[in-house]
Image (spheres, rainbow, N blue to C red):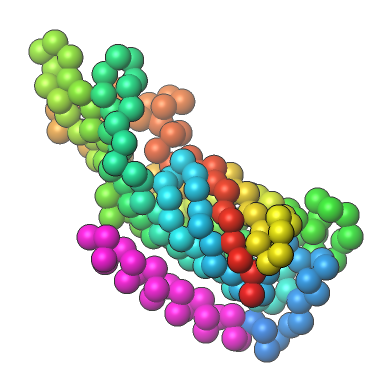
Amino acid sequence: MRIKLIKEFFWMLLMSALLFCCGKAEAQVLPEYSAFPTSSLGLQLGVQGLGLQGSYSFARSFNLRVGFDVTPDVTFIYNSRNLRVDRSAVYALVDWQPMYGNTQWFATKWFVTTGFGYYFNNTLYRQGIGRTPDYSVSMSKYRPYIGTGLGDIYLFGNVRLRLDVGSFLPTSAPTSSYENKANTITSGLKGIMPGLNTAATFYIKF
């Protein structure tokens, strides 16, 4: 499954390269105003997991990103019981810099994002209690994304930082292997957590 995920990532990377070539032929991007590098490859760390992310900017104020995330095999203690997340995904995002051309620091960094993610695995495993056995909750695999962030934050040399916050929105109701436990895990504020995305990407710009 991990091999398939990596193959999907490189297919999307190839598609983004084609868009990159087309976009550069149409408009010249001025680096001093842009929140996006011409192209980049970096390591992403966030609540969705650990992964690789590539990007290509096009048409001055737009940027295409593709990548994949894998959640490490870690078990958490929640309400004195074990909770494990099995999650791996690929995604494609388009960023837009609304204030491109302005010279203020925030204007040169801020962007908004939309796109989609596809989860190969998106399951929570919960330890049972009393007469309730161990059970799992499977969540929506195809999820559109909305978010915002800051890009092209200088660290050193050609290394930059990109910050994201947003949500992968569910397109179907969760299902549980035991009774209605899907509702107890994914309702209310707890329902936000499976799709929440807060991430930092450390990338090399080209």
Q: Which residue is found at the position 58% from the left and 44% from the top?
A: 165
The furthest residue to the right? 103
Q: From which residue to which does the magenta span run?
A: 1-22
Query: Which of the 4 quarters of the picture holds residue 98?
Result: bottom right
Q: Which residue is found at the position 33% from the left and 27% from the top?
A: 76
Nearer to us in this view, 45 or 116: 45
Nearer to us in this view, 49 or 165: 49
Query: Is 9 inside the magenta-drawn segment?
Result: yes
| Image coordinates for residue 203, horizontal then vertical, percent | 59, 61
Q: Dividing the image into 4 quarters, which one contains the N terminus?
A: bottom left
Query: Can residue 200 be seen at all in this image of the molecule?
Result: yes
Query: Can residue 166 be seen at all in this image of the molecule?
Result: no
Above or below for 43 versus 39: above
The furthest residue to the top? 130
The furthest residue to the bottom? 25
Left/right of residue 71 with respect to residue 199 in the rendered view: left
| Image coordinates for residue 148, horizontal then vertical, percent | 63, 49
| Image coordinates for residue 185, horizontal then vertical, percent | 32, 26
The furthest residue to the front? 157
The rendered magenta stretch, by its main secondary structure, is classed as helix
Q: Dividing the image into 4 quarters, which one contains the C terminus?
A: bottom right
Q: Which residue is found at the position 39% from the left and 73% from the top?
A: 10
| Image coordinates for residue 81, horizontal then vertical, percent | 26, 18
Exactly how many numbered labels are in the figure? 0
Query: Which of the 4 quarters of the picture holds residue 104?
Result: bottom right
Left/right of residue 156 with respect to residue 200 in the rendered view: right
Above or below for 76 versus 63: above
Query: Is 77 inside the magenta-drawn segment?
Result: no
Nearer to us in this view, 43 or 32: 43
